[in-house]
Amino acid sequence: MVNLISRACGKISPLSIKEYKNNGGFKGLEKALFNMTPKEVIDEVTKSSLRGRGGAAFPTGLKWKFVAMEEKDEKYIICNADEGEPGTFKDKILLDGCPFQVIEGMIIGAYAIGATKGYIYIRGEYPKSKEILVKALNILREEGILGNNIIGQNFSFDIEVRSGAGAYVCGEETALIESIEGNPGRSRFKPPYPPNKGLWGKPTLVNNVETLANIPIIMELGADEYKNYGTDSSAGTKLISVSGSVVNKGVYEIEFGTSLKEIIYDVCGGIEENKKIKFVQLGGSSGACLPEELLDTKLDFDELSKLNIGLGSGAILVVDDSICIPDFVKNTTKFFDHESCGKCTPCREGNRHIIKILNKFTEGEATERDLELIKEISNVMKEASLCGLGQAAPTALITTIKYFKEEYEDHINGSCEVGKCKMKKGVAANA
Amino acid sequence: MIGKDKLIETLINVQKNSKGHYISEDKLEEISKELGVSLSKVHGVASFYSMLSTKERGEYVVQICNSGPCYIQGANNIATIFEEELGIKMGEVTEDKKFSLEFTSCIGACDIAPAVKINNEVYGGLNKEKIRELVEMLRKEGN
Ligand SMILES: Cc1cc2nc3c(=O)[nH]c(=O)nc-3n(C[C@H](O)[C@H](O)[C@H](O)COP(=O)(O)O)c2cc1C
Ligand code: FES
């Protein structure tokens, strides 16, 4: 465990400017605004190798450059605080524990790309965090750190907070933009991408809360020192949200390069008594399910991409052997079915049909043909859905078919090892 | 444009101030006029977002999380216990309009799963006993 990005969380009183400053607060902002040109700021972020922490792991410096290159008077920066990925609760720790750090990252970003207005889009399920943010912004305005001529410099920028209203898809950046504009949050066709045409059709930078919280630290330490954390291919640290059958659940900051095994056993105190680990779902409900044999896998972008999986939001759900795989995947798919915005056919229809077929599995009526069918549907969804929601929805299904095929076969043959499913074919549970 | 982009925020506020945590037909019309947004658009937005309701709910809206981490910790059991304690099914409102029951997607309390959100408060580590106490407390609190 490390204390880099989360160093102030829990240690300072969240709305005390003085305590934030005593913990290194606004050093990064001062360095950027007093001594660096916007281009130099972007170069430093690029050099740090920071990649987005919202799920897609896109290189942050490059994204900033795209927006900076757009020659428009009006540009926007949006902090994505929608945090809807099931199993993820790490942005909340930053928002509640050190809101100034996230906002400082936004101000530096705005300076770098030339934005005059920012939005923090926070999920409706976090009303208390929203109140803290509104207070934090007011304090910064009074202190001259937000608004006109920030810290006495020729740079003006302000931020507004907007609420989501319970829609997972609004975490997707174009759906989020639709939602800020007052529409139902349905993903847009891409291109154009937000850096070219985003909010109100203007160039827009969307970054995750944690990504933005990294910025002041990178500015303060410099890219070289920042890169001392993590691995060659994955610089820095990651906030992980651990839930499920581990002893100590919660949010932890770890360096890239830490293995799942180390996280579960060293950081989280191992598996709860009398339970046996079955699989780990990495990256939330849209993430891959990995069997115990793969727990030596390190959290590292290169290593994960070799396995053809992503880190996602950094959620880690540890699942024990009392859970039935087809039943678990059915629950996951129900989530996506409920959250699908309905705009594209593969996602709208795919989830529905997968649930129908998985019902046959959990009722003992599935056949080999059904297994083939869900594989086909998954592929269509992955390849042809409009946005990341539909593309990632079948990930749990695809990876469990890969690593736990025998459990699907067992259900076809009328038995559920866990005894969760009532098999209509008449073979007793645990048979 | 000014009107339209305040629509969601307005709907949230109207709902917050209504005892039954919902936006009535009258209110929808009022908002439509006030913001200069067509009524169908207001309806469209109100029905798209899960947190917004156009149906009257309870004074206490009990939202049971059934996403992955809560599901594996027995969210369905939690739902059944609430149904028994309140004498209603998921999606219903108690006769005295004090409680309503619904499912929600992850509320970011996965470390204390199984979790529920009741109005603005989150409660975790639930079991039958805790749910009884909770319902008892809320029955006394609101009247
Ligand atoms: C269905 C869906 C939900 C998403 N939810 C979130 C979210 O809650 N928070 C977030 O930061 N990014 C989320 N993303 C990723 C965003 O689209 C976007 O990539 C991200 O905000 C960019 O910020 P970053 O580069 O700093 O990671 C989601 C993507 C999809 C497809
Ligand atoms: S899954 Fe229930 S709170 Fe996250």
Image: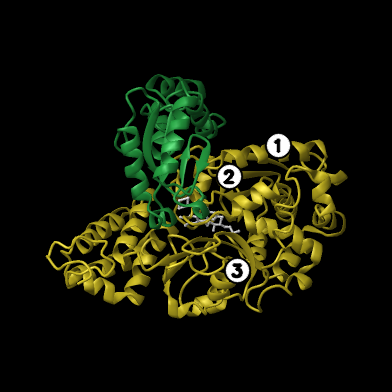
Residue under numbered circle 1: A135
x 71%, y 69%: residue? A48
* Labels 1 and 3 in the same subunit: yes
Q: Mark 2, chain letter?
A: A
Image coords of residue A407 (percent x, y): 28, 73
For ligand 1, tell me if the residue under mark 2 lies within 8 Å: no
Q: Report if the beta carbon of the residue with label 1 is closer than 8 angstroms to ligand 1.
A: no
Q: Are marks 3 and 2 on the same chain?
A: yes
Q: Nearer the viewer, mark 2 or mark 1?
A: 1
Pick whichever, A285 or A54, lies toward us: A285
Chain designation of label 3? A
In the picture, the disc for residue A267 is 3
Query: Residue A299 versus residue A182: which sits nearer the camera?
Result: A299
Report the Cα–Cα distance between label 2 and label 1: 15 Å
At 67% from the left and 62% from the top, the residue drawn is A65
Residue at the farthest left position: A426
Residue A342 in view of the camera: no
